[in-house]
Amino acid sequence: MSKVMDLTALATQLDQATLSQKATAQLTGQVALDLPTAYRIQAEGIRLREQRGERRVGLKLGFTSRAKMQQMGVDHLIWGELTDAMQIEEGGMLDLQELIHPRVEPELCFITGKEINGPLSLAEAGRVLEGVCPALEIIDSRYRDFRFTLEDVVADNCSSAKFVVGAMQNPQRAIDNLGVVMNFHGRPVQVGSTAAILGHPLRALVQIASLLHQQERVLPAGSVILAGAATAAEALRPGLHVSVDISGFGRTAFHTEGKL
């Protein structure tokens, strides 16, 4: 079997886990993977989604805390692709039967007002944005017991599953140290700060711009960028009202239904 066919088979294994809602074995338990190969598997998985009619709308960023980078042995963030099929309407319903073992994280979301076609300084990063939004990301590893290596999680599109975005705010507002509270039924389950995102969320944008430039890739205007988690994730269960409040900045929410 050719290398291309190998990558297609591995991407299909993860894709089938998504479609069947049944966790699968880690890829690194089957083959030796390096990070570039893991990204190629991720790209093949997105191609399978596009064949079903999904459309790319942006990126999600991962490992945007220094502690997580050290834990995983990397010195930069990782990224996955977002598609239109992943977005839930604000205040909408998430059917947990579509997922395996979902968790939710509070985030900031960037909406680009210009294409990102090269490296950015911290000052320049704010100027490419149309807006910044409160957001909630639902992650759902396709691996058993939510266990994976760095290469596994990248191949699995960085555990991307669903996301909700709130009202867009002025991108020139200060976002470096905003209080973040994630609630279940109005009761706090996680409390943190946007400073958890690389000390300043715009640093995540600076890093992804540099990484995209290395890949000779351009991110179009109007793209969604989930900047990374501001707190630890919480496991989801049916019948929840999930919301995030970002101090002086806004909120967004969704509901859960179905069975796990």
Image (cartoon, rainbow, N blue to C red):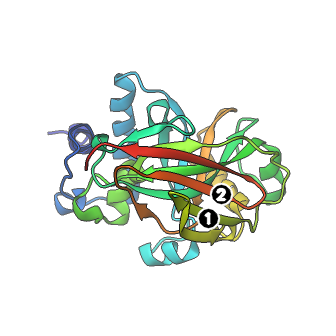
Question: Is 47 situated above or below 33?
Answer: above
The Cα–Cα distance between marks 2 and 1, rounded to whole angstroms, is 5 Å
Can you tell which quarter of the image residue 121 is in? bottom right
Q: Position of residue 119 (x, y in %)?
A: 71, 51
The answer to whether residue 208 shows anywhere in this view is yes
Kindly identify the amino acid type of the residue bearing the numbered disc 2.
Asp
The answer to whether residue 117 shows anywhere in this view is no
Question: Is 44 situated above or below 189?
Answer: above
Kindly identify the amino acid type of the residue bearing the numbered disc 1.
Val
Q: Position of residue 187 (x, y in %)?
A: 54, 64
Q: Is residue 157 left or right of residue 223?
A: left
Residue labelled with disc 1: 181
Q: Quadrant of the N terminus?
A: top left
How many residues crowd around disc 2 within 10 Å: few (fewer than 14), some, or many (20 or more)? Answer: many
Q: Residue placed at 51% from the left, 44% from the top?
A: 254
- Of helix, strand and loop, which one carries label 2? strand
- Of helix, strand and loop, which one carries label 1? strand
Nearer to me, 44 or 105: 105
User: Quick one: label 2 or label 1, which is nearer the N terminus?
Assistant: 1
Q: Is residue 22 left or right of residue 105?
A: left
Q: Are marks 2 and 1 in contact (CB under 8 Å)?
A: yes
Q: Is residue 93 left or right of residue 102?
A: right
Nearer to me, 85 or 57: 85
Q: Position of residue 210 (x, y in %)?
A: 65, 53
| Residue 245, numbered label | 2
